[in-house]
Image (tube, grey):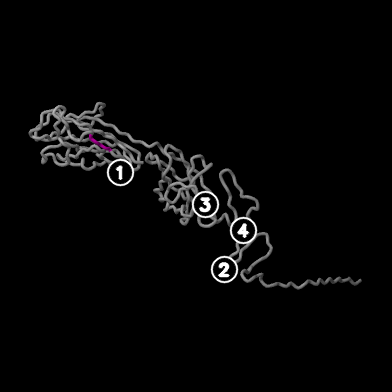
């Protein structure tokens, strides 16, 4: 018996491909329907398609956030917590030293400060003070933030605890979130000042009186006791010790005769009296004598009824200690009497 052969012929339509979709301004070089995505470009345009990005939110936990897809790959890395300190007991500034983490050299950074755990915060502006807004000029490179030396944030309230966080950016639409925080605190403004009267470096108490003893006519006498003072401050612009005389001349109690205050070398002057800074020391900082009291030998500075600087420190000062000579020279025929004047010493600090 012969077998039967069945023949099935399928007629398929011929596939016709149109030209690449395009318009006067755009052209799609590649297109299709797939499970993923792709990209295309021309001389003037680039089309980028995210592959595998979640369609609802980003995976996260208490400590981590997953930036997925093309957008996430272009984000700057969240900077680790910076080093935040008060290295010199400042009352109005704190030092921030950035930690760039895995960010590249072209990254820029912005710094935020808060006093309430970042319920609210302010931004460090380009002049290192705080402001409510963040502008393009406030972003800086690691070098712009002082590299390893860091940058002082200025104009802060004293006796206040601050928290700081840092964000990074690599250009448009690449800004990271604020990183973890670090804390530091300012302290109260401080100025200490004390006076002693002694021949050597000794702590004494009131009353403060310097005796010149018997003044030999036409001779220079230096009081055996000095005026000693202690001064210290955390003011960043330093401190000054000032002096003034209630009556500039030494005045005789009964005769009313005077020995005038002068500036110059008492050896070559016929008469006069004044002060000379004898010694200055400090633990940290720099304390220096002020004119006209910075002479040597028998040179003295004139006293006035207004305050004059005796010694100054340009910055913070710790353990400042100084002493002042009192010198006088009466005339050869000076009236015999008990002569005196009243001096006032004060100290001030600049914060």
Q: Where is 335 relative to 46, above or below?
A: above
Q: Quadrant of residue 304?
A: top left
Q: What residue is pinned by disc 2?
A: 44
Q: CA distance from mark 1 to mark 2?
A: 61 Å
Q: Which residue is mark 1?
A: 314
Give whichever of 79, 313 is nearer the camera: 313
Q: Is residue 31 above or below residue 200?
A: below
Residue drawn where x is 30% and y is 36% of the image: 347
Image vertical order of residue 129 relative to residue 333, above or below: below
Sequence-first disc among 1 and 4: 4
User: Which of the two discs, 1 and 3, labels the residue nearer the N terminus?
Assistant: 3
Q: Nearer the viewer, residue 151 or 78?
A: 151
Of label 1 and label 2, which has the lower sequence position?
Answer: 2
- Is residue 242 on the magenta stretch? yes
Disc 1 from disc 3: Cα separation? 42 Å
Residue sitting at x 74%, y 72%: 15
Closest to the camera, between mark 3 and mark 2, is 2
Residue tagged by mark 4? 50
| Quadrant that contains the N terminus | bottom right
Give the residue at mark 3.
Answer: 77
Q: Is residue 123 magenta?
A: no
Residues packed near mark 1 inside 10 Å, few (<14), some (14 to 19) or many (20 plus)? some
Question: Disc 3 on helix, strand or loop?
Answer: loop
Magenta highlight range: 241-245
Q: Position of residue 172 (x, y in %)?
A: 53, 57
| Label 1 SS | loop
Sooner in the amino-acid sequence: mark 4 or mark 2: 2
Tell me how far mark 4 sits from mark 3, CA to CA: 20 Å
Q: CA distance from mark 1 to mark 4?
A: 60 Å
Quadrant in the picture for residue 191: top left
């Amino acid at each position: 018996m012969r077998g039967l052969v069945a023949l099935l012929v399928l007629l398929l339509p011929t596939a016709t491909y149109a030209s690449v979709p395009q318009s006067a301004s755009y052209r799609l070089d590649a297109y299709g329907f797939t499970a993923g995505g792709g990209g295309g470009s021309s001389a003037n345009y680039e089309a980028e398609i995210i592959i595998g990005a979640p369609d609802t939110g980003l995976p996260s936990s208490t400590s981590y956030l997953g930036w997925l897809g093309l957008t996430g790959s272009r984000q700057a890395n969240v900077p680790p917590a910076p080093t935040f300190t008060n290295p010199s007991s400042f009352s109005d500034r704190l030092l921030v030293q950035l930690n760039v983490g895995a960010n590249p050299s072209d990254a820029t950074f912005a710094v935020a400060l808060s006093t309430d755990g970042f319920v609210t915060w302010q931004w460090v502006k380009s002049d290192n003070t705080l402001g409510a807004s963040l502008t393009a000029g406030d972003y800086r490179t690691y070098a712009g933030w002082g590299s390893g030396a860091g940058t002082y944030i200025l104009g802060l309230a004293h006796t206040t605890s601050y928290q700081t966080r840092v964000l990074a950016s690599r250009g448009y639409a690449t800004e990271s979130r604020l990183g973890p925080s670090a804390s530091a605190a300012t302290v109260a403004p401080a100025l200490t000042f004390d006076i002693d009267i002694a021949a050597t470096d000794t702590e004494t108490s009131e009353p403060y009186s310097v005796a010149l003893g018997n003044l030999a006519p036409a001779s220079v006498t230096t009081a055996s006791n000095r005026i000693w003072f202690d001064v210290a401050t955390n003011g960043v612009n330093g401190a000054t010790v000032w002096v003034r005389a209630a009556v500039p001349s030494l005045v005789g109690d009964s005769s009313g005769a005077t020995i005038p205050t002068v500036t110059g070398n008492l050896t070559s002057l016929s008469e006069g009296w004044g002060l000379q800074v004898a010694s200055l020391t400090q633990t940290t900082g720099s304390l220096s004598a002020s004119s006209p009291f910075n002479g040597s030998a028998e040179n003295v500075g004139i006293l006035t009824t207004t305050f004059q600087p005796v010694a100054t420190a340009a910055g913070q000062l710790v353990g400042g200690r100084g002493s002042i000579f009192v010198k006088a020279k009466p005339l050869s025929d000076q009236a015999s009497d008990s002569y005196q004047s009243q001096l006032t010493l004060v100290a001030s600090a600049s914060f």
